[in-house]
Amino acid sequence: MKKNGKMNEGTSGSVLTIQGLSDAILQDYRELKNWRKVGVKWGINEGTAYDIGVYRYEPKRPGLRCKLGLPALVPTSPCPIHGVVHVRKTCPKPKKEARLWDLPVRVLRWKLENREEDHPTTAV
């Protein structure tokens, strides 16, 4: 797919960011003045072209990302505390400790029977 004698960024093998893709799609819309034509040019439907251009929607499907020149999404492991993947680098909230009286009776009994004292005992 040529644009002013050059290949589109998405088809030349280079990797785009969502911002670069959005800017390229908006530029194509300014030239073509029709979202359907922009979609045909990029090999996507007009709704997806509009969402990427206007709202900077980031496609999740691997085939569509490859077609548009976006990098593949890398699966990450979830936070061991919350069980979800955080968008930021650090866990936003520390794990909330369970209150003693909220524990099941069996667990509470075991904790009381097997507890260790906080203060050290002095040897006589």
Image (cartoon, rainbow, N blue to C red):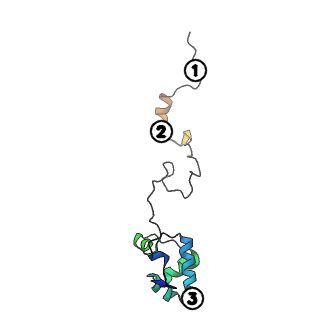
Residue 82 percent across, percent down from the top left = 51, 51
Q: Are marks 2 and 1 in contact (CB under 8 Å)?
A: no
In front: label 3 or label 1 = 3
Give residue 22's position: percent from left, percent from top.
55, 76
Decide: few, some or many residues near mark 2? Use Cα within 10 Å; few <14, some 14-19, many ≥20. few
Is 120 rendered above or below residue 97?
above
Identity of the amino acid at label 2?
Val
Q: Is residue 75 left or right of residue 4?
A: left
Most extreme residue toward the left, as rendered? Answer: 63
How many other residues sit within 10 Å of disc 3, few (<14), some (14-19) or many (≥20)? few
Query: Which residue is pictured at 53% across the width and 69% down the height?
Result: 17
- The image quarter containing residue 67 is bottom left
Circle 1 is placed at which residue position?
Answer: 120
Nearest to the observer: residue 84 or residue 97: 84
The disc at residue 24 is none
Residue type at numbered disc 1: Pro
Residue of label 3: 31
Residue 123 image-quadrant placement:
top right
- Mark 1 or mark 3, which is nearer the start of the sequence? 3
94 is higher (above) or lower (below) than 59: above
Q: Name the secondary structure under disc 1.
A: loop
- In the picture as drawn, the residue positioned furthest to the top comes out as 124
Find out whether the residues at labels 3 and 1 contact each other: C-beta distance under 8 Å: no
Q: Position of residue 72 (x, y in %)?
A: 44, 65
Q: Which residue is mark 2?
A: 105
Residue drawn where x is 58% and y is 76% of the image: 55
**Residue name at image x 49 percent, y 36 percent:** 108
